[in-house]
Amino acid sequence: MAERLRILLVEDVTDDAELALLELRRSGLHPDQRVVDSEKAFVGALREFAPDVILSDFSMPGFDGMTALTLAREICPDTPFIFVSGTIGEEFAVSAVKSGATDYVMKANLVRLPAAVERALREGRERAARRKAEGELGALRERLRSIVSTLPDVVWSAAVPSREILYVSPATYTVFGRTEKEVYENHTLWGEPIHPKDRPRIMALWQGAVTGETFEAEYRIVKPGGEIRWIQGRGRFTGDAAGNVVRIDGISRDITERREHERKLTQLSRVHAVLSGINSAIVRVHSRDELFRDACRIAVGAGEFRMAWVGVVDRESMQVKPVAWDGEVRGFFDNAPLAATATSGQSLVGQAVREKKPAVSNDIQNDPQKMTRRECLERGINSLAVLPLIVGGEAVGVLVLYAGELGFFDSEEMKLLVELAGDIAFALEHVGQEERLTYLAYYDALTGLPNRTLFHERLTQVLHAAKHGRTQVVVATGDINRFRLINDTFGRQAGDALLREFAQRLKTIWPEPEHVARISADVFAGALADVHDPGDIAYSIDKAVTAIIEAPFTVEGKELRIATTAGVAVFPADGEDADTLFRNAEAALQKAKESGERYLFYRPEMNSRVAETLLLENKLRQAIKGNQFVLHYQPKVDGRSGRVSGLEALIRWQDPETGLIPPVEFIPILEETGMILEVGQWAIRKALEDSRRWRMKDGSPPRIAVNVSPIQLRQRNFVEAVRRSVEEAGAGGCPLDLEITEGLIMRDIEENIPKLSAIREMGLQIAIDDFGTGYSSLAYLAKLPVTALKIDRSFIITMASNPQSMTIVSTIISLAHSLDLKVIAEGVDAEEQARSLRRLGCDEMQGYLFSRPVPPDKVEDLLKGNPP
């Protein structure tokens, strides 16, 4: 290493100095040297010679090595200082090193000197480089600190997982309201400003992010003065050599203004969407109600308002009546005070109507005049606006919008919303004119009923549906007898009053009020859709006409009784289109007027059929009064023992003229006229009376099943009627079963379950009749309080020849047993059927194989095992 060094020797013995230099040369070091032995010379050499290394004796007369060390550290602190001495002891050597000496070499061991010098020089260079780097780093830090101090964002560094703040920039005071000193002194202070509602989310994000690389979140803080600001925090995690996360460095930025700007843009965008949507709707709507419904729907859907409603001013009650709404409105108007929609008083609605300008509450919770505060806050509503709808200079209604945000309705939003209200009001005015024209085109101005045109359109639609459904439609036309005489006698005003009252009664009483119309002066029409037997409909028409005219009409303060005449046509027999059908109904009306009949069908055979139906109805009424109904009983036999285990009561009519009449010929009329209610209750009482009589003779008669009509089950007092019949019969133990068809139970399942449960509590059992023909849900079947399933006879009859029927029967039996229900098969007429049912585990069987229905006096023989 041919490197020229400048070595300063502090030595008072020349030979010792030469020996040291010799050892250095021997190792390849060729220094320039200067030798001094006094303090003055030493100080001068330090400044002038600027040595690379100092070699000093420890002990010299008049100038010792420790003094030289002290001076060297003051003048050139970076220059290596090595003691070369023969007198230094270990204690002094340690003290010298502590005082700044680089090393020490004993004169007796100068061979160490070159290595010590080289090491000292090397370490010196490293120290110099390190100091230079540290200086540059310090300068860089200072520059960065200067730059960071100008940033509005908080730059920070925190330890993981302790969250101890390692660094925070001065902006922490501006952003968080905490000084750097406060943050450093309280290492947990960084989390305290986070808004309580956001803190759990941010803590969870922090914990989740520790395992990743970055952290980013937007959250609210609460400054010491209570001000709430929005912050965006971003950080990157740093790990140690082992891969463990030890630190996170990040930036926190106040984004309150940005959030507010975004909020405003979002709100304006929502209002623009409402404005655009409603303007599009205005083009296509044709009615006021449709306009109002669309306005509310669009406000909630496109505008994201919590709730919206439109109210119309009622001048008589001085109330604003809600007519359309959308959103979280359930129960709102039920609970809101009436004064909240009054046009007088302090309500915002009333204020908007009176002043004809918008009324706004941007902080409902703190608004002393807000009458629906509780209802709004329960729905998360914090602000609302009431926009008057001005037509012809008057406030005819209001559009009320409810927002979840505080302060939603400021000047920019309101400017757009006022424009929106103006557009709705403009459309309302034109829709009103259009509605009036449309109304006059399709409705009778005097009575409010549809006119001939609308009736024709609706009849066409009904006929179209009937063609696809293969059902019949009845059209009836009728007029008021001697109406012209009434008009001439009492005047047209009185005649108009009569027509209005007649129309009102017709609309109220007709079975399908949407299908009635005023055709001409005193001629009205009505249609009945989905008719299966037009003959049976005669009763409905006759009943409706009677109900309309049985009470007198009031004309000019006087009571007036009227009569009517009607003509009836039936689709498709009397016409397959609306024109033909209506024309034939009018022809039937004319024929009825000429003949003096109350009403006539277009086809003569229909009149005969109607006459027969009415005659049958009268005979049935006489049958009830004359006690002509009887019960026959068909046994049910046990599937295992073959013994009689039950009876089904089957009603018959013992007509004095024609003899025993089966139920299929008279039950429909009983149901149509409502007489089934009285007959059904009689059947229950009679079955219980027979059971009691047999019990007194035999002691243990089987249970009796009675069929229940749909008309009976639909009655509100059905349960009470059954209870009364049971009590009147005095049936101890109540050995009665009710059989109800599957379709009837499932039609109103939710309403029927409580009724059937009450019946079961009386001790009665319930069987589902005709099972397999309806659409029972397994879930509902498990809920029903029934005790048995009765397989429909259609499956029993075909089970031997149809594998599908056999599968259905087997499935029903398995299903019933899994639900702990008894299974009864009806229509068992052959031994082969009985064998199959026994093999499948059927509990009871009923059919001609065992016995036809028999009168009560033959039942005792059945119970004794004797065939009838």
Image (cartoon, rainbow, N blue to C red):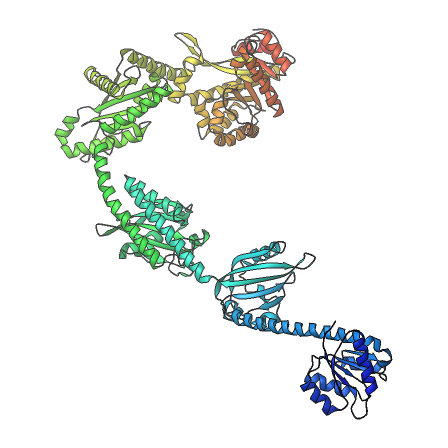
Residue 513: % across, % down: 31, 29
What is the residue that sits farthest to the right in this orientation? 108
Drawn side of residue 683 relative to residue 354, left or right:
right
Q: In terms of depth relative to the viewer, which is nearer, 642 or 812?
A: 812
Q: In terms of depth relative to the viewer, which is nearer, 298 or 54?
A: 54
Q: Is residue 761 above or below residue 591?
A: below
Residue 17: % across, % down: 80, 84
Residue 127: % across, % down: 69, 74
Q: Quadrant of the N terminus?
A: bottom right
Residue 446: % across, % down: 20, 34
Q: Is residue 103 above or below residue 67?
A: above
Drawn side of residue 538 relative to residue 662, left or right:
left
* Location of residue 676 (image quadrant): top left
Q: Residue placed at 33% from the left, 14% from the top?
A: 615
Drawn side of residue 671 relative to residue 480, left or right:
right
Q: In terms of depth relative to the viewer, which is nearer, 141 or 569?
A: 141
